[in-house]
Image (cartoon, coloured by chain):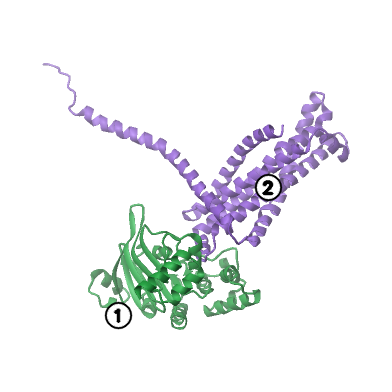
Amino acid sequence: MSYTAKIPSGSISQDAPEATSLLRATLTSLWSPINGFLEWFGELGIFVWQVLRAAVRPPLEGRELVRQLDDIGSKSLPLVALAGAAIGAVLALESRYSLVRFGAKSLLPAAVIFSIIHETGPIVTGLVVSGRVGAGIGAELGSMKVTEQIDAIEASGVNPYKLLAFTRILACILMLPLLTLAADFCGVLVGWIVDTLADPISFHKFLHTGFAGTSFSDFLAPTFRTAVFGLLIGTIACFQGMRSQGGTEGVGRSATSSVVLSSLFVILADVILVKLILVFFP
Amino acid sequence: MMHAEQAVASQAAQSGDDHAIQNAEQNGAGPAVAIQGLHKAFGAQKVLNGVDLTVASGSTLVVLGRSGTGKSVLLRLLIGLQQPDSGSIRIHGQEITGSNVETMNAIRKKMGFLFQHAALYDSLTVQENVAFPLRRHTKMTASERGDRVEELLASVGMESALQKMPSDISGGMQKRVGLARALALEPGILLLDEPTAGLDPITSREIDDLILKLQEERDVASIVVTHDLHSAKLIADRIVLLHQGNVVIEGTFAELEKSDDEFVAQFFKRDS
């Protein structure tokens, strides 16, 4: 009886196509998200171009702009003010604990005010607005898209990029700095209340001490960087809403992705803008 | 004569303004709508595969076909909501394929579009919905606009719903409001996507009568996509039957009814 090693004929040639198809499948699964990412940016670029083209052409759409200023601005005010107040309270409590520990209690007003106007006020406003307004715009425009209302606007000879997108984006840009001021004010006010409950100090003295080492640029640049947050929130939410598809499920996806992406872009922009502000307003 | 018509149409195409379009119309530059070799595909799925159609002013063309044969896509191509892959669409002699937004918007003001599900703006009242094109494209005073809106809503039997929101009225009522909105600017061309779907027989008949009235009194050219053969019989001057992206047959209702073609016969058998 002889034993001979038998290599199944054709096993190599059969394995080779399998390996090739496995490699192809792996490459496809790796390429797919990259392709989707690039496609998203490409479509966003086209959308921005269409909005810019529409923006420079009449009519002004003043009526819709005022409606959006009210919707995005005044209706976000309570939430933004509450978030600012909460941040002010937390900062006062946390800072007191740390500063007392290191014997620097007198720096408390400066720590609270500087922290609020420099970082927490703008970023909290950006994130709160991206949650409330981003979801609202994404869902509203998404719903209009899947029910053909945007097509109906276009079919009636009106540019939807001007009427729907440009007005919302402009309203976000204009209202974010104003909402940031409100958040800053509420934060400082509640910070003082919390501070004065523990160690009485007049509001005037709190402000005077707090703003003693700060210049106008300390206040101006961080506040106006929220206009960039507004641009990002408005653009991304309008884009996600207007490309919505797939019925009510698609509307839900648009609202969610509007919030997630606009929040993400606000955080990324914050990092970049903080660095730029430190460079240009040292 | 042909050269003169082409020159007028070309002038309109180049300038793209209302005046040029009006000139093209007044000089009789061909039919209200002329489609030649229209192709449209979504990925691998061919929806329209070389469709040729013409619709004269004052006539109604009914487009029939099974669901998903590209009837609604045809209307969307005509109003410029989608672009064809190839082919020509001429509106009052003016080529619209590849037109810029301004030219297309000038043409759209002369066309009324009723969407399959009405597509009313859900943040506006019925009155505001119908007033929307008037507010955007006319210099009417608020009072004139109000009168016009009431007149339009009365013509579709919806005068009692002025202040209601679209969500507070039925689908059929929304369709009637959508029709009133499509008629607001007194368009020369009406594109109606299933105007009688979801309506009771009496209202359907009223809508049919309204289409006939517009055709007779205002010389409106209508393209109606429908599955309602009773309505088609009543309003159509000509009918085309679309199947697999092609026009299978074109003729009057009586001609199509008598056709020996198996598909045409199947289509008409159910209602006969």
Alpha carbons under labels 2 and 1: distance apart: 65 Å
Q: The green chain is which one?
A: B
Residue found at the very far top of the displayed protein: A2
Q: Left or right: B260 with respect to B237?
A: left
Question: Which residue lies at the image location 38% right of the left edge and 37% below the top edge?
Answer: A28
User: Residue A128 is drawn in which quadrant?
Assistant: top right
User: Residue B70 is drawn in which quadrant?
Assistant: bottom left
> Tag 2: residue type?
Leu
> Tag 1: residue type?
Ala
Quadrant in the picture for the C terminus of chain B: bottom left
Vertical placement of A76 versus A210: above or below?
A: below
Q: Colour of chain A?
A: purple
- Which residue, given by chain and number where applicable, does mark 1 sit on? B254
Question: Which residue lies at the image location 41% right of the left edge and 69% below the top edge?
Answer: B9
* Residue B58 is at least partly visible in this image: yes
Q: Position of residue B226 (x, y in %)?
A: 39, 71
Q: How crowded is mark 2: few (under 14 residues within 10 Å), some or many (20 or more)?
A: many
User: Residue B64 is drawn in which quadrant?
Assistant: bottom left
Vertical placement of A166 versus B126: above or below?
A: above
- Which residue, given by chain and number where applicable, does mark 2 sit on? A176
Q: Residues within 10 Å of mark 1 (few under 14, many from 20)?
A: few
Q: Left or right: A98 with respect to A33?
A: right
Q: Position of residue B207 (x, y in %)?
A: 46, 78
Q: Left or right: A137 with respect to A22?
A: right
Residue at mark 2: chain: A
